[in-house]
Amino acid sequence: MEKIPIAMTIAGSDSGGGAGIEADLKTFSAMGVHGTVALTAITAQNTVDVFSVQDVELDVIEKQIDVVFEDMGIDAAKTGMLYRSEVIELVARKIREYGFPLVVDPVMTAKSGARLLKPEAEESLKKILLPVATVVTPNIFEAEVLSGLKISTLADMRDVAKRIADLGPKAVVVKGGHLENGNEAIDVVYSDGEFRELRGSRIDTRNTHGTGCSFSAAITAGLAKGKSIMEALEEAKNFIQIAIKYGLSIGKGHGPVNPIAWMQIDAEKYRVIENLYNAVKMLESSKIAKLIPEVGSNIVMALPKPYANSIMDVAGIPGRLIKLEDRVFAVKSPEFGASSHVARIVLKVMEYGEEWRAAMNIKYSSEVIEACRSLGLTVSSFDRREEPDEVKTREGGSLPWGVGKAIEKAGKIPDVIYDLGDVGKEPMVRILGRNAVEVATKVLMIASKLR
Ligand SMILES: Nc1ncnc2c1ncn2[C@@H]1O[C@H](COP(=O)(O)OP(=O)(O)OP(=O)(O)O)[C@@H](O)[C@H]1O
Ligand SMILES: [Mg+2]
């Protein structure tokens, strides 16, 4: 069996769990490498500020690196908060001794402005650590300090990246998070005598605590896995986009980014597909063709919040459920983005109760509604004739409008929402549930009540 790659973070601890080694370890795990630590400092910190800093003794830092290296090897490492010159000298010496690739995040201040590197250590960073670095990832402010130049444009970022490369690292990434470039966050890369850019859309959020740490940790994870520098940078950029997009609104200051989103989205997708698959098996094994309307039925399930934002985040059956004699069958396996109608219903329902993530449309008849009521299901409805004109003309606006009406009328999320249709619109019943299996269970109960 291949051994899991080993990455190390040589950095400080953030008691608020948003940056520092805490962010690095989450990132390492999310990216499939084993994370190890050489702790350099303990900070008392939260989303608002850094309140105190306690150094770790130099020989204890060295020992942490040595014992990990001797025992399991280190495939790549990163530095974060190093704080003082002696630590910088130590890390440079260890890199010369052990030779693993090193990503230097030249952390100087925290988002709050607190100093994480003593001013007198800036020279050691330039002269001693950058020459042994594989990648260095300054933000705009740090790049200005390292190069002695001012940055206000993308062209300045290039000049500065080249100037910093002269100090010896293989690749320089000047991060553009703090530079207003319209609606993009552009990082400039200089390596092997060439410029490249890492581009991502700028996300409007306060929750950016730990962006720099998580980004450099993601690069380190890539290098530990044996990727080239450019491959590692591109993956890290995708990674940080997602971590920022799903940042956590906690604390009174800048909430932390969420490195776990990278793998959690995939895990949740699997759970949704599996649940839908089981629901479809239940539906296929019963005689429910009478419940399928002319337009066919779809059963859908959304990712949990905050990941459910568009119909691409809702899985359904491509081609819908089709009647075959007295049974139904799914034309294809469940996929994300395979439904628009029923998916939009679920997205609307989730605005009222985020745990209600699944729905299926079935054929309307007064007997179906009666059956629902006698089963004790909560039933609500809307009237398409009451729909305001401005909603009618908006593509895809009708159903969410009706669903909102029906929920408000019931005063809670009902199990069943129906409408009697309108000119050219078939009457329809939608069965709601927390997951697809729950929806299928309700549909089967209705079918057996009708028999
Ligand atoms: N609002 C945003 N939207 C999208 N990407 C962003 C945003 N802010 C930062 N980034 C990206 O995140 C990465 C980290 O950059 P940033 O400039 O924030 O680092 P930093 O200042 O070192 O962060 P920290 O303050 O956590 O140390 C870069 O790839 C940057 O482009
Ligand atoms: Mg930073």
Image (cartoon, grey):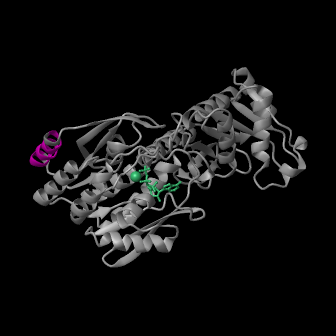
Report the number of numbered marks: 0
Q: Position of residue 401 (x, y in %)?
A: 79, 43
Residue 108 is a magenta residue:
no
Q: Is residue 348 left or right of residue 41?
A: right
Would you say residue 295 is visible in this rendering? yes
Q: Position of residue 277 (x, y in %)?
A: 50, 43
Secondary structure mainly formed by the magenta segment: helix
Q: Which residues make up the magenta segment?
A: 60-71
Q: Is residue 341 left or right of residue 178?
A: right
Would you say residue 290 is visible in this rendering? no
Q: Position of residue 214 (x, y in %)?
A: 38, 50
Up the image or down, 180 lies above or below 306; here it is below
Which quadrant of the figure has residue 56?
top left
Q: Is residue 183 left or right of residue 62?
A: right
Q: Position of residue 416 (x, y in %)?
A: 71, 32
Q: Nearer the viewer, residue 380 or 294?
A: 380
Q: Is residue 427 left or right of residue 320?
A: right
Residue drawn at 48 percent across, 55 percent down: 241
